[in-house]
Amino acid sequence: MNNIILIGMPGVGKTTVGRKLANQSNKPFLDLDEEYCRIYNMSIEETFFSLGEKIFRKREKNTIESLTMSGITNTIVACGGGVVENEDNMHCLKKLGKVVFLDCDIDTLISRMKTTSQKAVFKNYSLEELYQRRIALYKKHANITIDTRGKEIKETVDLIINL
């Protein structure tokens, strides 16, 4: 249970913070979205657009279950934004370690999403809809919540390390 699991909305910085945190703490880093792409040899965008969200969510759950069974330790794990919508996912992830919710306001997320490439989920939903649907779930499942508004990446990483 010495892994750190990062959850939060798309654009909040889970991957960026995760990589810096892993680097600073000399721990391995695992991005679940990248792991998904490696396992299925298909991007998330391709899956959403060609197979649909339902298939993606099933595959995402399988990826998380295999990660849980792998026995990883001492690792920083960045999750996809929708991971919290499945209770089984969160049950598995909580077995792996501390869940850290990186939070930030919707306006900041919108501005960040203009520069991010992962917009597959926005085919069916707006960022605001997803935020409203997920915010309570993030808070429910988090062991620690960090508000990233106005914080530099290093400041967020330092907060996680100190907590």
Image (cartoon, rainbow, N blue to C red):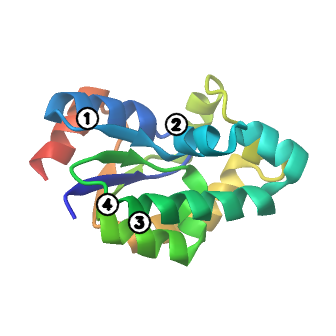
Does dot 2 land on a helix, a strand or a loop? helix
Q: Position of residue 26 (x, y in %)?
A: 16, 32
- The vertical placement of 147 against 111, above or below, is below
Task: Please give the name of the residue rendered at 23% of the width and 28% of the height, measured from the top-left corner.
Answer: 23
Mark positioned earlier in the residue sequence (1 or 2): 1
Q: Are marks 4 and 3 in contact (CB under 8 Å)?
A: yes
Residue extending farthest front: 70
Q: Which residue is mark 1?
A: 22
- The vertical placement of 92 against 100, above or below, is below
Task: Please give the name of the residue rendered at 22% of the width and 65% of the height, measured from the top-left corner.
Answer: 1
Residue toward you, 52 or 63: 63
Q: Which residue is mark 4?
A: 71
Q: Nearer the viewer, mark 2 or mark 4?
A: 4
Q: Are marks 3 and 2 in contact (CB under 8 Å)?
A: no
**Gap between marks 4 and 3 measured at Cα:** 5 Å
Q: Which residue is mark 3?
A: 69
**Gap between marks 2 and 4 measured at Cα:** 36 Å
Mark positioned earlier in the residue sequence (3 or 2): 3
User: Mark 2: few, some, or many residues within 10 Å (few <14, many ≥20)?
Assistant: some
**Gap between marks 1 and 4 measured at Cα:** 18 Å
